[in-house]
Image: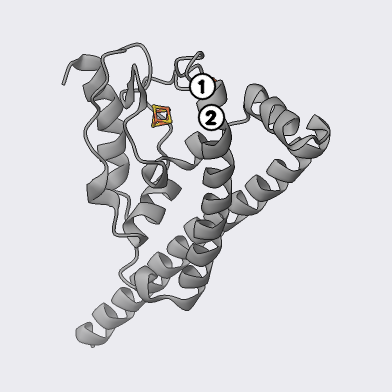
């Protein structure tokens, strides 16, 4: 890896150390949120996959310019609960001024592994092309896609919040146990 790729991967590795509650994977609320997240991602992925072959090849990753990529804590939670964190490959890009996972033939990350920001990018070209193909008003197309994105973001944030709550509960339990031992 060159320096730019190391930088891109360092952010992912740093976030990979996000503290995750031991009980999150068995938690009913988190399980239900994951079902909603997977459904939302599936809808967006199917939508973008149908349109991107028309719009993206000429653009050469115009939206993938962040050299540190778009990873966030919530992406790590999602991938961990999917048992997919270890499936994220090291960056392989030659275009070092952009995201490390971007190559001349597109992103090397499978769609189901990409950060949320990557799968919900507000691209005017995509919305216009989708509206054209489906014969609907672009404004209505925006509203439909926005609705899916808004719900998806709420679920991701709820998952993040649920993890914090469980971590706090775990810490309190540990403190109680410690106090009991001291008695
Ligand atoms: S999603 Fe939009 S900005 Fe990104 S590569 Fe495709 S057309 Fe370009
Ligand atoms: S879609 Fe792929 S190449 Fe583009 S920013 Fe996201 S991870 Fe990087």
For image coordinates 70% across by 32% down, the residue present is 133
Up-down relation of residue 25 to residue 127 (above or below): below
For image coordinates 39% across by 54% down, the residue present is 77
Q: Nearer the viewer, residue 141 or 12?
A: 141
Estimate the x, y position of residue 105 in percent, counting from the top left. Answer: 35, 21
Q: Nearer the viewer, residue 63 or 48?
A: 48
**Quick check: is the Cβ at mark 1 less than 8 Å away from ligand 1?**
yes
Residue beneath disc 1: 56
Instruction: Label 1: state its secondary structure.
Output: loop
Left or right: where does residue 82 sit relative to residue 156?
left
Up-down relation of residue 153 to residue 163 (above or below): above
Q: Quadrant of ligand 2?
A: top left
Estimate the x, y position of residue 177 in percent, counting from the top left. Answer: 27, 82
Estimate the x, y position of residue 151 in percent, counting from the top left. Answer: 65, 53
Up-down relation of residue 123 to residue 175 (above or below): above
Estimate the x, y position of residue 164 in percent, counting from the top left. Answer: 45, 61
Residue beneath disc 2: 52
Q: Are marks 2 and 1 in contact (CB under 8 Å)?
A: yes
For image coordinates 72% across by 48% down, the residue present is 147
**Quick check: is the Cβ at mark 2 less than 8 Å away from ligand 1?**
yes
Type of colouring: one colour
Up-down relation of residue 164 to residue 89 (above or below): below
Q: Is residue 20 visible?
A: no
């Amino acid at each position: 890896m060159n320096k730019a790729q190391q930088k891109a991967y360092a952010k992912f590795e740093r976030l990979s150390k996000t503290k995750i509650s031991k009980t999150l994977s068995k938690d009913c609320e988190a399980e239900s949120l994951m079902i909603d997240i997977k459904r939302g991602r599936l809808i967006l992925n199917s939508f973008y996959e149908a349109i991107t072959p028309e719009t993206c090849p000429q653009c050469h990753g115009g939206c993938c310019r962040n050299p540190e990529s778009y990873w966030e804590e919530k992406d790590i939670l999602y991938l961990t609960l999917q048992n997919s964190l270890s499936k994220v490959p090291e960056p392989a890009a030659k275009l070092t001024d952009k995201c490390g996972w971007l190559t001349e033939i597109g992103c090397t990350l499978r769609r189901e592994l990409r950060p949320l920001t990557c799968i919900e990018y507000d691209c005017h070209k995509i919305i216009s092309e989708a509206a054209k193909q489906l014969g609907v008003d672009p404004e209505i197309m925006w509203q439909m896609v926005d609705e899916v994105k808004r719900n998806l973001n709420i679920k991701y944030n709820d998952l993040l919040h649920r993890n914090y709550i469980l971590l706090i509960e775990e810490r309190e339990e540990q403190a109680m146990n410690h106090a009991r031992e001291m008695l």
